[in-house]
Image (cartoon, grey):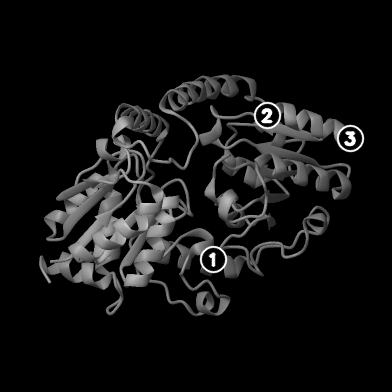
């Protein structure tokens, strides 16, 4: 019988529900918990707590896979310390490594790739492959998921509270974010308060950007402070470092009649604020009156009216390409390629941005969706996502590691 092992998942019951469905399909499921939050949301046929030191993790994990004959491992994110090491172990043993992430196409999709995501993606992203790809005759996209803010907030606070309550049982655990349960809860409450505040204070800003400033502003969507995209897939030191670099380049090279809009990441709304930094940089680079810092403006509207997008490697870059907006990537991103993004320097982007090849992007978008995206969400209406996961497993290529799970899910045993 096939065996699947789950490590850390997104906050909430998504991994538990997926494990239960796989179990009903005849696949034996295992869950390894690293803290009380993992255990609180967990479900599997067999569960085990790893309470050892990080230095013991590789030996423990490899031994566990061999002992139980695991054929697939599922994780949320491939850059967490435990997951990064698990990825190497799975590669050495020929065990399928399924990585979930927030969708490359948002907000109504999630990502599932075998081997890695983002700049670690093992999908063939060469232009030749994309150009020659023959799309499947698939059903239309699922209906929109809707707002997930409160689901995410409640799951996150529950996770960190459970992690704190069981801290004595996992004394050696090192979390990938340097916040305790109290700080996490306070930040989510602050996020809610700020959401309402910005809705009032920024209510006239959208009309200004869509009116008098239409096609006269560049957009720089900020990423979360602890985003692995920044930490692992770019050479920038921090969000602050990125803001400094972009504003300095803008001041020196952008036409004098344009402005730049920095949009705070919605998931970081209650965790950090960059107003003081931006004010100091505006003064340093003499661009007062040419910089707008905002939070909760409607992104598609901004993309309809901006003349260009600068991003570290956010999936907003893909949304920008969908709107045919010239885009410059500062980090490493799977969509950063000729025909899609600006291949010149940042300094040249402000006055001579390279256009998006619409025909190629349409092929890229279809390829991206069919190879990596699943309809649904981790937080709401997760049944849609789970059904999509099962279909992805069942369509695994014969001979690949994940095909073993496909056979089991169809036949009950192997």
Q: Give how far across and how far down residue 264 sits, in percent.
A: 61, 35
SS category of the residue bearing label 2: helix
First in sequence, mark 2 or 1: give its number: 2
Is 353 above or below relative to 76?
Answer: below
Pinpoint residue 371: horizontal percent, then vertical percent. 41, 66
> Are the residues at dot 2 and dot 1 in contact (C-beta closer than 8 Å)?
no
Q: Is residue 121 above or below residue 301?
A: below
Q: Is residue 14 left or right of residue 257?
A: left
Task: List x then y, in percent, for residue 261.
Answer: 71, 38
CB under 8 Å between discs 3 and 2: no
Residue depicted at 54% across the width and 45% down the height: 227
Q: Nearer the viewer, mark 1 or mark 3?
A: 3
Indicate which disc, 1 or 3, sits on the residue closer to the N terminus: 3
Quarter of the picture containing the C terminus is bottom left
- Residue 362 numbered mark, or none: 1
Task: Report helix, strand or loop for mark 3.
Answer: loop
Q: Local crowd at mark 2 within 10 Å, few (<14), some, or many (≥20)?
A: few
Q: What residue is rendered at 77% in x and 35% in y?
A: 291
Residue where numbered disc 3 is placed: 286
In this rendered view, identify the residue nearer to me: 265 or 3.
3
> Residue 135 or 101: which is nearer the viewer?
101
Residue at numbered disc 2: 205
Label 3 to label 2: alpha-carbon separation: 23 Å
Q: Residues within 10 Å of mark 3 (few under 14, many from 20)?
A: few
Category of crowding for the residue at label 1, using alpha-carbon neighbours closer than 10 angstroms: few (below 14), some (14–19), many (at least 20): some
For the residues labelled 1 and 3, the Cα–Cα distance comes to: 40 Å
């Amino acid at each position: 019988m096939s065996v699947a092992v789950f490590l850390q998942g997104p906050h909430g019951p998504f991994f538990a529900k997926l494990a239960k469905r796989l179990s009903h399909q005849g696949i034996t499921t295992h869950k390894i918990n690293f803290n009380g939050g993992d255990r609180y949301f967990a479900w599997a046929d067999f569960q085990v707590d790893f309470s050892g030191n990080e230095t013991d993790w590789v030996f423990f994990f490899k031994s566990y896979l061999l002992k139980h004959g695991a054929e697939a491992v599922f994780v949320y994110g491939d850059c967490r310390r435990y997951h990064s090491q698990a990825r190497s172990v799975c590669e050495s043993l020929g065990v399928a490594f399924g990585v979930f992430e927030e969708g490359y196409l948002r907000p109504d999709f999630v990502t599932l790739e075998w081997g890695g995501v983002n700049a670690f993606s093992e999908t063939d992203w060469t232009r030749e492959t994309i150009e020659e790809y023959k799309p499947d005759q698939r059903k239309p996209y699922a209906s929109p998921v809707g707002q997930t803010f409160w689901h995410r907030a409640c799951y996150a606070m529950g996770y960190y509270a459970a992690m704190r309550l069981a801290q004595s049982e996992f004394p050696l655990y090192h979390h990938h974010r340097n916040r305790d349960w109290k700080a996490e809860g306070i930040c989510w409450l602050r996020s809610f308060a700020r959401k309402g505040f910005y809705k009032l204070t920024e209510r006239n800003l959208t009309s200004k950007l869509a009116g008098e400033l239409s096609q006269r502003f560049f957009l720089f969507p900020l990423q979360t402070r602890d985003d692995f995209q920044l930490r692992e897939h770019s050479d920038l030191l921090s969000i602050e470092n990125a803001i400094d670099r972009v504003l300095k380049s803008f001041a020196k090279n952008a036409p004098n009649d344009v402005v730049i809009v920095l949009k705070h990441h919605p998931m970081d709304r209650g965790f950090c604020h960059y107003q003081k930094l931006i004010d100091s940089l505006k003064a340093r680079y003499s661009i007062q009156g040419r910089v707008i810092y905002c939070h909760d403006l409607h992104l598609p509207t901004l993309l309809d009216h901006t003349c260009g997008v600068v991003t570290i490697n956010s999936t907003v870059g893909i949304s920008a390409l969908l709107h045919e907006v010239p885009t410059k990537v500062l980090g490493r991103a799977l969509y950063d390629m000729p025909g899609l993004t600006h291949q010149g320097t940042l300094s040249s982007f402000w006055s001579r941005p390279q256009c998006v090849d619409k025909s190629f992007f349409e092929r890229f978008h279809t390829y991206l969706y069919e190879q990596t995206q699943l309809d649904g969400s981790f937080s709401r209406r997760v049944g849609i996502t789970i059904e999509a996961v099962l279909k992805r497993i069942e369509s695994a290529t014969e001979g690949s590691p994940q095909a073993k799970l496909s056979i089991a899910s169809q036949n009950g045993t192997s």
